Amino acid sequence: MRELRFAVKHTLPIFFTYLFIGIAFGMLMIDAGYGVLLSVLSALFIYAGSMQLVMVPMMASGASLLTLALMTAFINARHIFYGIGFIESFRKMGWRRFYMIFALTDETYSILCSVRYNDELDPNRAAFLIAMLNHLYWIFGCLIGACAGRFLPFDMRGIEFSATAFFLVVVVEQWRQYRSKLPFLAAVVCALALALLLGREYFLVPTLAACLAALLLLRRPIERKEELEHE
């Protein structure tokens, strides 16, 4: 019980974030012609946040499973680096380690990195509850949004723009947070070049691959700039 109270306390801010983003996702799913059950199942088994928002218009436009899989791999590749720091701690959690690997989102990662456990708590149980509560918040938000879109009679024209708005907010926040603009400039150059070269229908996955390669090449200059700015 102590671990549960501890987890609720540290995840409560995430509840409101996931609630509203989940509502937008659920309504997008309904607007695209998918049912409440599929919306909830995608939140339960995919649990990819931004990728779920991207997934809806892609599925509606007839994108292949291979394209969706590749996009998911590229967008969520950062989780590989997140997980490296938790290999030893997750290994000590027994069967729960499999769920922790699955549920390590950006928000859960940030909490687990900053949280401090007192002597009265079981750290493994508390960390597991933190991850699980965040997942439940997301499922709940998706359920509310899907039910609202399915059963409440209102015009949902324009709701698809919520995904675009979400990513614009993320980009603006990232632009303001990091002093080095090289990642953004690399992304813009790759996107424009490949869109002109391959066309709007085929440029997305190659752009993600090109951005990943560019960021790997620019990693040292970016890190040096960030270090200089903090000195």
Image: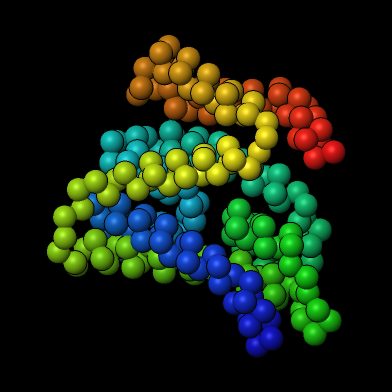
Q: Is residue 87 positioned above or below 124 on the image?
A: above
* Residue 90 seen anywhere in this rendered image of the structure: no
Q: Is residue 204 positioned above or below 12 on the image?
A: above
**In the foreground, 26 or 46:** 26
The residue at 40%/13% (across/down) is 196
Please tell me in which quadrant of the rendered image residue 23 appears.
bottom left
Q: Is residue 176 positioned above or below 5 on the image?
A: above
The residue at 48%/61% (across/down) is 17
Q: Is residue 111 left or right of residue 149?
A: right
Residue found at the very far top of the displayed protein: 197
Residue 219 position in % (x across, y down) = 73, 28
**In the foreground, 208 or 190:** 190
* Residue 183 seen anywhere in this rendered image of the structure: yes
Residue 37 position in % (x across, y down) = 31, 63
Q: In which quarter of the image is the N terminus?
A: bottom right
The residue at 34%/34% (across/down) is 63
Residue 43 position in % (x across, y down) = 43, 59
Residue found at the very far bottom of the displayed protein: 1
Residue 36 position in % (x across, y down) = 29, 63
Please tell me in which quadrant of the rendered image residue 160 appears.
top left
The residue at 61%/53% (across/down) is 106
Q: In which quarter of the image is the C terminus?
A: top right
